[in-house]
Image: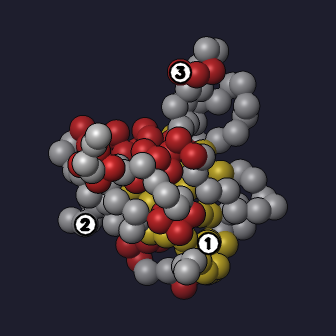
Amino acid sequence: MSTSSTLLLDSTDSTIQKLIDLALEVKDKAYCPYSNFRVGCAVLCPDGSMFSGCNVENASYGLSMCAERVAVMKAVSEGHQKFKATAIVCDIKGSFKASCGACRQFYSEFGLDLEMYLVKPDMTVKKVILGDIFSMAFTPDALMEERI
């Protein structure tokens, strides 16, 4: 059963508004000279800590890093390994943009119950749950299963 809803920014709680504001702020720092596709992300930890990241491109495209992974790596490098929510913003007006498959896999390492707030430039927000948009994820539990 999919859990998804579209909200107005002013209908989100103040913590989520701060998370979105942080993602918006860092989006402007994105280094994306090749795609001109700016993305900002912020993650919320259970203790209220927030960490942000923007996408960083490289001429060797495979070395580019998505905003979501930058934010998670910053949090982990500061000792956080649990996440309650994430806010993802970009400049695309027409539709909500969710994380790429690699970032969904990266998030799934830390739990499929992550609340994801996808934000369009007009400040409409769509809330989804990671597990609903990334079924059959390869999680750490898979490595614990019995082998032949």
Tell me where residue 16 appears, x and y as whole percent: 44, 71
Residue linked to disc 2: 46
Q: Is residue 132 visible?
A: yes
Question: Which residue is found at the position 76% from the left and 62% from the top?
Answer: 95
Q: Secondary structure at mark 3?
A: helix
Question: Which residue is found at the position 72% from the left and 34% from the top?
Answer: 36
The answer for how far apart the CA atoms under marks 2 and 1 are is 21 Å
Residue linked to disc 3: 63
The answer for how far apart the CA atoms under marks 3 and 2 are is 30 Å
Question: Which residue is found at the position 50% from the left and 80% from the top?
Answer: 12
Q: Is residue 18 visible?
A: no
Q: Nearer the viewer, residue 110 or 120?
A: 110
Q: Residue 126 has which mark?
A: 1
- Crowd class of label 1 (few under 14; some 14 to 19; many from 20; radius 10 Å): many
Q: Nearer the viewer, residue 69 or 139?
A: 139
Of the numbered discs 3 and 2, the one sitting upstream in the chain is 2
- Crowd class of label 3 (few under 14; some 14 to 19; many from 20; radius 10 Å): few
Whether the residues at callouts 3 and 2 have beta carbons within 8 Å, the answer is no
Question: Which residue is found at the position 52% from the left and 31% from the top?
Answer: 65
Tell me where residue 54 appears, x and y as whole percent: 51, 40
Query: Which kind of residue does numbered mark 2 sit on?
Result: Pro
Query: Which kind of residue does numbered mark 1 sit on?
Result: Lys
Q: Secondary structure at mark 2?
A: loop
- Crowd class of label 2 (few under 14; some 14 to 19; many from 20; radius 10 Å): few
Applied colour scheme: secondary structure
